[in-house]
Structure formats: C-alpha cells, structure tokens
C-alpha cells in the first residue's frame, strides 16, 4: 500500500525533495513497514507505530535500559551511516603509505565488526525465527 501511495500521490513531491529528506523518508518507511510486518495483529502494529512516534520507549524502564545499553552502538551506527567514514578512508588512501595501511586494516576492521555483531547476537535474548508464524 505504501508503494501504491508513493507512486500515485508522493511521486512528484519526492523527486523535488532534497536528497537528505528522501533518505530520511526511505528510512522512516522501512521502519514503519518492519513494525507492521513484525506485529502479530493490526492493533499491535498500530501500537508499535504509535510508540515509534509517541515516545513510549522512553517512558518505560525497559526502553530506557535499552537506550542506555545501546547508546554507543547507536551513535557509532549513525556516524557510520554518513559519508564521513568513506571520505576519511578516501583521504587516507590517497597517499601511497595510506593506501597500503587501508588495504591491511580494512579486512581486519571488517573481521572485528563481524565478531562484535556476532557477540551482540549471541548475547541477546532468545529470538525465535520470524517466519515461523507463516
């Protein structure tokens, strides 16, 4: 339904928007669609979307605990989603020594990132496979 609304109603307006706003729109649309897909029922999906916009996660103890626990990860992810890391790597690899350093450190960084992500997945609570409901 979102794709139909986008094609029929929002198409020309989205083309005229700045790139940053189109990117934010895409992220918001993906978040809302993930919430709807994950919900067991339509009212539960509505509550999840209302919580996304209404600040409900910041009023519960569990929400505050999660925010405190993952604040650094969220901050690093937000920074990593910007063009800054790519620009820094391009600037460093512009020199001969920097190019060699980047070619050595990139696989090491990716392996470390894989280990950290795997550790967070293993440490998380039990999360059954999403598609079992289907």
Image (cartoon, rainbow, N blue to C red):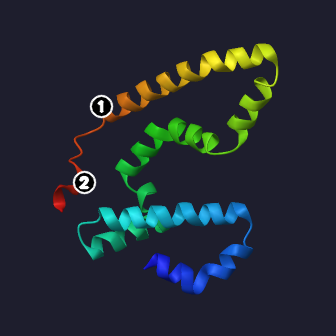
Please state, as top left, top right, bottom left or bottom right, where the N terminus lies in the image.
bottom left
Q: Where 78 sits versus 108, above or below?
A: below
x and y percentages locating residue 109 in the rendered image? 55, 23
Q: Are marks 2 and 1 in contact (CB under 8 Å)?
A: no
x and y percentages locating residue 33 in the rendered image? 41, 66
Q: Dot 2: within a 10 Å radius of its alpha carbon, few (fewer than 14), some, or many (20 or more) residues?
A: few
72 on left or right of 34: right
Q: Residue at x 22, y 56 (%)?
A: 131
Q: Residue at x 54, y 18 (%)?
A: 108
75 on left or right of 89: left
Q: Residue at x 41, y 32 (%)?
A: 117
8 on left or right of 45: right
Residue closest to the far bottom: 8
Q: Where 128 sits versus 54, above or below?
A: above
x and y percentages locating residue 68 in the rendered image? 47, 40
Which quarter of the figure has residue 90? Answer: top right
Which is more toward the observer, 56 or 123?
123
Which is more toward the observer, 38 or 43?
38
Which one is in front in this view, the residue at disc 2 or the one at disc 1? 2
Q: Which residue is mark 2?
A: 130
Which element carries disc 1, helix, strand or loop?
helix
Which element carries disc 2, helix, strand or loop?
helix
Please state, as top left, top right, bottom left or bottom right, where the C terminus lies in the image.
bottom left
Which is more toward the observer, 88 or 77?
88
Which quarter of the figure has residue 10? Answer: bottom right
Q: Which residue is mark 1?
A: 122
Q: Residue at x 62, y 15 (%)?
A: 104
124 on left or right of 104: left
Is residue 48 among the parts visible in the rendering?
A: yes
Dot placed on the residue nearer the N-terminal end, 2 or 1: 1
Measure the alpha-carbon separation of dots 2 and 1: 17 Å
């Amino acid at each position: 339904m979102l794709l139909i609304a986008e094609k029929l109603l929002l198409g020309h307006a989205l083309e005229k928007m700045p790139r940053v706003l189109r990117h934010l729109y895409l992220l918001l649309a993906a978040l809302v669609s993930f919430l709807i897909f994950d919900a067991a029922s339509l009212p539960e999906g509505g509550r999840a979307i209302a919580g996304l916009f209404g600040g409900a996660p910041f009023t519960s103890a569990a929400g505050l605990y999660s925010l405190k626990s993952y604040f650094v990860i969220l901050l690093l992810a937000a920074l990593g989603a910007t063009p800054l890391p790519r620009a820094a790597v391009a600037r460093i690899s512009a020199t001969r020594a920097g190019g060699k350093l980047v070619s050595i450190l990139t696989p090491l960084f990716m392996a470390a990132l894989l280990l950290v992500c795997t550790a967070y997945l293993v440490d998380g609570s039990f999360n059954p496979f999403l598609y079992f409901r289907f």
